[in-house]
Amino acid sequence: MYTTVKIRVEAKKKLEELQARLRLRGIKARLYEVIEKLIELGLEEEEELVNKFKSNTEQEDPMLKLLRKPLNWNIKDASIKIDEVLYGESSGSIHRYEHIRSSKK
């Protein structure tokens, strides 16, 4: 007895590529046979399969990760001393471009 399983087009292409690689090694197998062997392999190598799923879910945007757990720069008020810390010089003012004046009075 057979049943239908829906997979993405990309996954089907990879499955067919795997089937072709097996064929190059002299193994003729239908797609359902390849899937059956992959299921058996997944049961035998369960830890490796679990690690594959974990690695897919742990791919997080590094910027979001940084926002959740910011770096500690050991500065009480980084908003004022950020240029001094980053560039190593004291500008004497919190405004980087204080020498630029507006023409409006």
Image: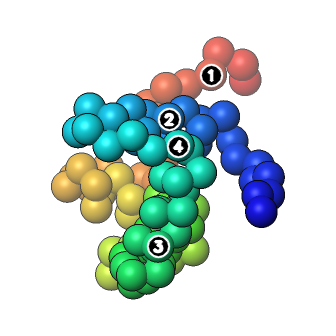
| Above or below for 88 versus 42 | above
Q: Nearer the viewer, mark 1 or mark 4?
A: 4
Q: How many marks?
A: 4
Q: Please identify the residue farthest to the left as the structure is shown.
A: 88
**For the residue marked with disc 4, what is the amino acid?**
Arg
Q: Residue at x 42, y 53 (%)?
A: 93
Task: Say which element carries label 3.
Answer: helix
Q: Residue at x 39, y 81 (%)?
A: 44
Q: Which mark is residue 16?
A: 2
Mark 1–mark 4 distance (CA, rounded to whole Å): 76 Å
| The C terminus: image quadrant | top right
Q: Earlier in the sequence, mark 1 or mark 2?
A: 2
Front residue (pair 18, 90): 18
Mark 3–mark 1 distance (CA, rounded to whole Å): 74 Å
Q: Nearer the viewer, mark 1 or mark 2?
A: 2
Q: Nearer the viewer, mark 2 or mark 4?
A: 4
Q: Residue at x 70, y 47 (%)?
A: 7
Asked whether residue 100 is in view, the answer is: yes
Query: Which residue matches tag 4?
Result: 30
Task: Say which element carries label 4.
Answer: loop
Q: Earlier in the sequence, mark 3 or mark 2?
A: 2
Mark 3–mark 4 distance (CA, rounded to whole Å): 16 Å
Query: Which residue matches tag 1?
Result: 102
Q: Earlier in the sequence, mark 3 or mark 1?
A: 3
